[in-house]
């Protein structure tokens, strides 16, 4: 039963897979819109500070924990703290979180596939109708797309770490970079594209306030896939000779560069079509942006490049977002898969089928909570209104539990595992880490302000959402 643990074939394999996890829907639309609405360059500066000074230490803590224990989050906590220790609950939480976030991420990925197929079929004009989204998400065709997405994720994951996750990332990530650059290159040639670039980059510090700052941190946290046990799990597929610190920095750089570049694609397109766009009125959510706002922008491009040209741009865009979403979904579902395989000695295929069954049911419920079934649509009531199953999963796991998991990892590393052991682990395979300034910074930040910031964000979100 004890087959040796699989590892990524190289550090590059890890970087592509982890960047595949990090680069997702959040980068493609969430980031550019958040930046434009919240002070452009001023937001970018705050975001960059959080990424480097807060997220990088947590990221390295997760990766170090993973490589040290060679296990999934639950296994990582119990292998260092013992199976009876209360830390095991933190381990379970770090497995349940991706399971639940997988449900909501799956729902959105399914919709993206639906829109991709519609544009491929030449129906850009249909999806550009603002009424279409509401009809689409309540139509039976979503179940067909759900089956397709589940099948793709299954085939990637069932092949294992090297032949599945790594191989998919090696093909999909370069394709993603190329599609992104092609779209940016095209969009920047449009008239008035510059107005978009300007709104995106010129700093407006008057927009910065407490909620923008905490929003920037949440965005960075989610974008780097932190607090989900993903980097613990992927870190466990690193070998002793791999440079964890260098790999972490590369993942961070890739994720941030893609988010930044996506802004040069989305905003110039919007401003080229309507130079008078008021940034404050850009869509509230990424979901509205992808499924109602952008299709109208693509259709309007027909005036410049014809319907076929506009459809091609739309196809590339949806394919880009779909690829980004699939590599993220794969990483999310790998966490519970690895846990089940270890804890119950299941084969990967059996573990995936169990997950497909349980997650499938939850995804169906979440999908049906958009109006198909009233019981799920008005499922609970808190924060002054009734909320659907989808809202509940989103509010609890995405908004609230992510920073909590980050906090628990921080506390575990500092109080239980000890920063000295983290450093020994990170130093294995690294060059120039030992006793350097960066190492000192990691110790300092993890023991002082990072847990405080995460605790404040956690408490604030709970008060904000539920009371
Ligand atoms: N980082 C991904 C994004 O930006 C989402 C994600 C979150 C993926 C957590 C995996 C884990 O969209």
Image: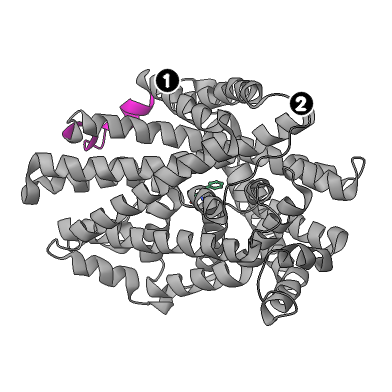
Label of residue 143 in the image: 1
User: Quick one: label 2, few (<14), some, or many (20+) residues within 10 Å?
Assistant: some
Q: Which residues are magenta?
A: 125-139
Q: Secondary structure at mark 1?
A: helix
Q: Residue 94 versus residue 417: which sits nearer the camera?
A: 417
Left or right of 416 on screen, residue 56 = left
Residue at horizontal 73%, vertical 45%?
73
Q: Residue 406 versus residue 424: which sits nearer the camera?
A: 424
Left or right of 261 on screen, residue 447 = right
N-terminal label among 1 and 2: 1
Q: Secondary structure at mark 2?
A: loop
Residue at horizontal 42%, vertical 77%?
206
Quadrant of the image for the N terminus?
Answer: top right
Vertical position of residue 446 compared to residue 152: above or below: below
User: Quick one: label 1, few (<14), some, or many (20+) residues within 10 Å?
Assistant: some
What residue is shown with label 2? 345
């Amino acid at each position: 039963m004890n087959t040796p643990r699989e590892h990524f074939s190289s550090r590059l394999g890890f970087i592509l897979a982890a960047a595949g996890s990090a680069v997702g829907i959040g980068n493609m639309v969430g980031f550019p819109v958040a930046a434009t609405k919240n002070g452009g360059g001023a937001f970018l500066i705050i975001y960059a500070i959080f990424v480097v000074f807060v997220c990088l230490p947590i990221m390295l803590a997760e990766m170090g924990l993973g490589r040290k224990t060679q296990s999934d989050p639950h296994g990582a906590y119990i292998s260092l703290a013992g199976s009876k220790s209360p830390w095991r609950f933190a381990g379970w939480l770090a497995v349940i979180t991706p399971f639940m976030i997988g449900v909501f991420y799956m729902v959105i990925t399914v919709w993206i596939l639906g829109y991709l197929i519609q544009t491929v079929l030449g129906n850009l004009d249909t999806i550009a109708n603002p009424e279409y989204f509401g009809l689409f998400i309540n139509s039976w065709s979503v179940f067909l797309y759900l089956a397709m997405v589940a099948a793709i994720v299954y085939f990637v994951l069932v092949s294992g770490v090297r032949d599945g996750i790594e191989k998919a990332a090696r093909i999909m990530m370069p394709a993603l970079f190329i599609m992104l650059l092609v779209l940016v290159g095209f969009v920047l040639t449009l008239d008035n594209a510059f107005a978009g670039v300007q709104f995106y980059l010129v700093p407006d510090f008057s927009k910065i306030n407490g909620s923008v700052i905490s929003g920037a941190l949440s965005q960075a946290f989610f974008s780097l896939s932190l607090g989900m046990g993903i980097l613990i799990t992927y870190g466990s597929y690193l070998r002793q000779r791999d440079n964890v610190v260098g790999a972490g920095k590369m993942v961070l750089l890739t994720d941030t560069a893609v988010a930044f570049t996506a802004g040069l694609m989305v905003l110039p397109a919007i401003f080229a079509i309507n130079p008078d766009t008021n940034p404050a009125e850009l869509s509230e959510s990424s979901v509205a942006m992808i499924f109602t706002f952008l299709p109208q922008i693509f259709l309007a491009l027909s005036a410049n490049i014809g319907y076929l040209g506009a459809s091609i741009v739309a196809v590339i865009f949806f394919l880009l977002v779909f690829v980004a979403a699939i590599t993220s979904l794969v990483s999310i579902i790998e966490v519970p898969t690895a846990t089940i395989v270890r804890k119950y000695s299941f084969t990967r295929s059996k573990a995936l089928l169990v997950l497909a069954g349980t997650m499938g049911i939850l995804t169906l419920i979440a999908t049906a909570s958009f109006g198909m079934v009233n019981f799920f649509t008005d499922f609970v009531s808190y924060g002054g209104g009734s909320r659907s199953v989808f809202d509940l999963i989103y509010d609890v796991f995405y908004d609230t539990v992510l920073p909590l998991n980050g906090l628990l990892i921080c506390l575990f590393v500092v109080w239980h595992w000890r920063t000295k052991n983290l450093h020994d682990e990170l130093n294995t395979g690294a060059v120039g880490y030992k006793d350097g300034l960066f190492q000192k910074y990691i110790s300092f930040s993890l023991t002082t302000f990072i847990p405080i910031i995460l605790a404040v964000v956690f408490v604030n979100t709970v008060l904000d959402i539920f009371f």
